[in-house]
Image (spheres, rainbow, N blue to C red):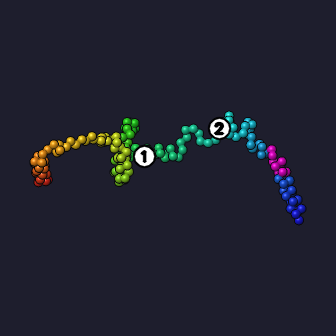
Amino acid sequence: MVEGMIEGKRVLADLAMLFLFQHRSSIESNRINRRGLMPFEKGRAKTGGRQKGTPDKKDVAREQLTAHALQVAGLSPLEIDALTPLAVMRLVMTARWRAGDHAGALLAAEAAAPYVHPRLAAADIRVISTADRMSDEELKNEILLLEQRIKAAETVH
């Protein structure tokens, strides 16, 4: 029985070798193209694929959205050419605000703010105290004067 199994394996191996021998020429011809170069070898001309300059789906969609947005904004081609990045941010902000997208308008406003409003510089404040040179009587008078100013300000408002 063991001899039959070994003989069966040999028969399968012989059949596999015969198949490879008979189809060897077609396997090798698939690996080598007409010019005798292997695929992806240097010097091989590119074939197939998208031609240069052909827009893909994302580019077409972006162009359509841009055209629609500019049509909604009512801008002429000359006005579009004259737009600055700040003007675009302001247009987006107002369009989103009018559309009810307040979160989107806030994002556009945050992006435009540094170009419109300057940052506040850190102030160098020095407090000079003259209280240490004043007598107790002068300090009491100063306190009374400040209290009178506070009362006067409270009565006005």
Q: Is residue 121 visible?
A: yes
Q: Residue flagged by tag 1: what amino acid is it?
A: His
Q: Residue at x 83, y 48 (%)?
A: 21
Residue 36 locus on image (x, y percent): 75, 37
**Residue 46: mark:** 2
Q: Residue flagged by tag 2: what amino acid is it?
A: Lys
Q: Give the magenta range.
A: 17-25
Mark closer to the observer (1, 2): 2
Q: Secondary structure at mark 1?
A: helix
Q: Secondary structure at mark 2?
A: loop
Q: How many marks?
A: 2
CA–CA distance between discs 1 and 2?
A: 37 Å
Crowding at mark 1 (Cα within 10 Å: few <14, some 14-19, many 20+): few
Residue 52 locus on image (x, y percent): 57, 38
Magenta stretch prevailing secondary structure = helix
Residue at image mark 1: 68
Crowding at mark 2 (Cα within 10 Å: few <14, some 14-19, many 20+): few
Compare marks 1 and 2 and give the one earlier in the sequence: 2
